[in-house]
């Protein structure tokens, strides 16, 4: 089973990120986007993946994007969430 991280932002950070991440503008509201994120996690879970939501801090995400020369996007948010989850797990194991 593959572990998949689905990134979520706070409502306030979502509003800021809408101007930086084009996919976020496709959603009418934060709740609409959050429903989409939950739906993605549920769909992956039904498909046999271990999917979970990971709260991401926008500033840390943007710093990570700049450091890795990656344009901010929803898929980049998820990649960052995955790396963040791995780092958290490693810290917890230590």
Image (cartoon, grey):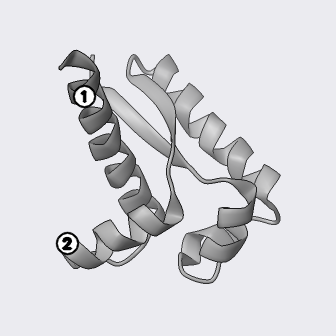
Picture coordinates of residue 84 (x, y %)? Answer: 33, 43
Q: Quadrant of the N terminus?
A: top left
Q: Which class describes the residues within 10 Å of circle 2: few (<14), some (14-19), or many (20+)?
A: few
Where residue 3 appears, as percent x and y from the top left, is: 32, 26
Q: Up-down: is 36 above or below 48?
A: below
Which residue is tagged 2?
Answer: 68
Q: Along the line of sight, which residue is nearer the eye, 92 or 33? A: 92
Picture residue at 50% right of the left edge, 51% below the top: 56
Tell me the CA gap for discs 2 and 1: 22 Å
Residue 68 sits above or below residue 86 on the image: below
The label number, if any, that marks residue 91 in the structure image: 1
First in residue order: circle 2 vs circle 1: 2
How many numbered tags mark residues here? 2
Vertical placement of residue 62 versus 91, above or below: below
Residue located at (47% from left, 62% from top):
74
Q: Position of residue 12 (x, y in %)?
A: 73, 63
x and y, in percent, of residue 41 in the image: 54, 32
Picture disc at residue 20: none
* Secondary structure of the residue carrying numbered label 2: helix
In this rendering, the answer to whether 57 lies above or below 68 is: above
Residue shown at the point (82%, 66%) measured from the top left: 28
């Amino acid at each position: 089973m593959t572990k998949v991280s689905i990134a979520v932002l706070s409502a306030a950070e979502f509003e800021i990120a809408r101007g930086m991440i084009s996919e976020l503008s496709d959603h009418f509201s934060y709740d609409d986007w959050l429903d989409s994120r939950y739906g993605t996690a549920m769909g992956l879970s039904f498909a046999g993946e271990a999917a979970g939501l990971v709260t991401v801090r926008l500033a840390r995400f943007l710093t990570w994007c700049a450091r890795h020369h990656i344009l901010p996007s929803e898929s980049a948010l998820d990649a960052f969430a995955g790396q963040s989850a791995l780092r958290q797990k490693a810290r917890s194991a230590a």
